[in-house]
Structure formats: C-alpha cells, structure tokens
Image (cartoon, rainbow, N blue to C red):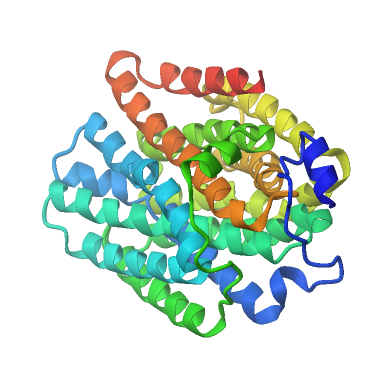
Amino acid sequence: MSSEAAVSDPVSGGAAGAAPAPPAGTPVLGGPASALALALTLFVEAVGYGVVAPTLPFLARSAGAGEQRIGFLVGLYAAVGLVAGFPFGALAGRYGRRSLVLVGLGFLTVSSFGFVLAPTYGWLVAARFVQGLGATAIWVGTLTMAADLSPDSQMGRSLSFLTGAWSLGFVVGPALGGLGSVRFPFALYAVLALAAFVTGCVALPETGRLGARTTLAGMLRVLRLPAVLASAAATFALSFFYGATEAFVPLLADQMNVRRIGIGILFAVAGLPSVALPRLAGLIADRVGDARLILWGLLYAALFNASFLALTGTLPLWALFFLLGLVEVLIYVPAVALLNRGLHRDDRGLATGSHSYAFSAGFFLGPLTGGNQMPLGGFPPLFATPTAVMLGTVA
C-alpha cells in the first residue's frame, strides 16, 4: 500500500510515510524458523491463559477467596496490561521486539513456579501479576513482529496463522488444567514456557528499527487513527466477554455437577473454532473488509450471550461451548488485521500497545463487574452486561 493510500483510506488506519511492506511473495512470517518461534510463543501464552479456567477459581477458593476476590484474581492478569501495554509498546520500538518477547517468556516461567508454590491468596496475586506482565510483553512483541513480516495485502491470512496457534494453546490449556492436582498443571506449564524461551533465543528475528524514540505527539497521532480506535473497541468488548466467562462460567458448570476435568474439556471445545477457522476468517477479512466482519461478530456475540442461560437447558454443554468459541474467530482475527494494515513500522509498537491496553481493560473489568454482580443477582446480570457492551460497541 502506498503512503497516499494509507492517508486516504480511513479503514486501513495507515499513516503518512508508511514504511514499505514486505513484498507479496514473502514467506509467511518471514520463513519457517521465525514462524515456528512466533507460533510457539503465542501457543505457550495461550496455554497459560487457558489453564486458568479449571484451576485458578478453585485454587483461590481453597485459599478462602469469595466471588469478588476470585474475579479480581482472574482479572488482574489483564489489569497489568493497563499499566504496561503502552510502555511495552515504546520499549518494542526502542530495544526491539525480540527482547520484549524473550522477557515475556521469562516472566511466564517465573509466574508458573509461583502458582505451584503459592501458600496464600496474596502469593497467588503476586504470581498472577507476574503472569500478566509476561503476557503483555509477549502480545506486544509478537504481534508487532508478525505485522513487520507480513505484506499488507495478506495481513489477515498471515496473522490468522498466529491466532490459530494461540487458539490451539487455548484448547490445550484447559485440558491440561484438568489434570492431576490443582497445582500440577502449572508445573508442566513452567517447563513448556522455558522450552519456548530457548526456541525464541535461537529462532526469533529482530524486525524493528532499534533506537526509535517515542514522543507524546507521536503516541497521540497513532491513537487517533480510526482503525486503531475501532480495533481497540472490538478488542475491549471481546475481552470483557471472555473475562467474565472464564471467571464464573466454571462455577456455573460446577453447579451443574461437571467435574473439574470436564470443565477443562468444555473450554478446550470452545477453542476448537479458533483452531480450525482463523485462516478462513482472515481470508474473509481480506476480501470483505475487517470492519464488516467485526460487526458481524459483535452482533453474533450479543445474541449468543443474551441466550446463554436459556440455551443451557436446550443444548448439550459441548455444543454451547463450541458456539461460544465462534465469538473469538469472528472478532479477534479481523481486529488484529485492521490494527496493522498500512501502518508505519515504527508506529506498530504503540498501536499494539493500544490493542493490549484495550484487551487488558476488558479482561479486567469483565471479571470485576461479574464479581460484584454475582452476589446481587447471580448469573443473569453476569450475561446481561457483556451483551450490552457488545451492542454498544457496534455503534
């Protein structure tokens, strides 16, 4: 895309003077080694994200935590991104995307051992905080690096490869979380995170322009781009929905006499659409436009969420969780593509930082809001609020 097109096309979100994108014939994500390293990194982050559903609410409950403290603990992972998202975006430009990814993998390894050893709720909070730092660093670093390696015309398809890897991790994570004792999955995860760190040291490239400085004017310019704002709104709505779901739907399943390993399997089923369908979603986004697919996804999510409790009595739980998983495919793949098309390479760290901020805000406020609503009205308001957020985002 030329710089003139980037200026004139409000959907692309491009900025004047956009750096030349890789040619259309460029290998996916720079070639097999870098593609594997990036995919493994997001796979590992997703395993840590998914392993929480059948473990953390019960680990917190065993430490004496009520619904509000469970909601805070689950949401803290994302709240860290509210503080670290933009600084990490600036660091990605100044010191490189590769360093940020490796630091993130190191944090994930440390936090996993923290969950294994945590004796009290306070220690669980500390481990979750470090996990949130690691996840934020990984998302900012990997998505920025992946966009650097992807031609604009193939952005949706290239980034769908990574969202597919993440979704595969989200399938594995809940299944892993159902194994053994409530702490055992975190020991396995620590080994997996360490393996990803070693792989990243060997295979991750450096794609940024080291030493690029971040100014307030430059930050405000990026954050005012229509595509950046639209992507952030969609990402916030999606993460608000999933944050509340991950914190409290396991407790709903527990009331329905589903065992912890069964809860893990249900969340694994929810990840299947995002493993099988992200490339199709990327192709559709490249063909019909990112914004249009996002709107379809938001409307579907609002309808599904409003019907969730009623559907629990008519559909088997595995089918219901599969339908839940479609929400991510329809919103997240085009939201990431919309964020990066036509954007100057030096601006991508900040743009991805805004994406991380939006995700963190939603994933923090979703569980926190649900934790305050549950003692007042139970599950109905828990599902009504994300429905309102989805419909509001359509505007």
Query: Left or right: 160 with respect to 37?
Result: right
Query: Left or right: 42 with respect to 164?
Result: left
Q: Quadrant of residue 38?
A: bottom right
In the figure, 255 relative to 88: above or below? above
In the figure, 297 relative to 262: above or below? above
Q: Quadrant of residue 285?
A: top right
- Foreground: 32 or 63? 32
Q: Residue furthest top?
A: 376
- Foreground: 101 or 267? 101
Q: Quadrant of residue 71?
A: top left
**Residue 150 placed where, x, y %?**
74, 63
> What residue do we see at 58% from left, 43% from top?
318
**Residue 280 placed where, x, y %?**
80, 51
> What residue do we see at 84% from left, 51% from top?
2
> What residue do we see at 35% from left, 39% from top?
75
**Residue 361 placed where, x, y %?**
43, 35
In the figure, 243 relative to 25: above or below? above
- Image quadrant for the C terminus? top right
- Foreground: 175 or 165? 165
Asked if residue 388 shows in the view, the reply is yes
Query: Left or right: 368 with respect to 385?
Result: left
**Residue 218 placed where, x, y %?**
55, 44
**In the rendered picture of this protein, how many numbered marks are placed on residues?**
0
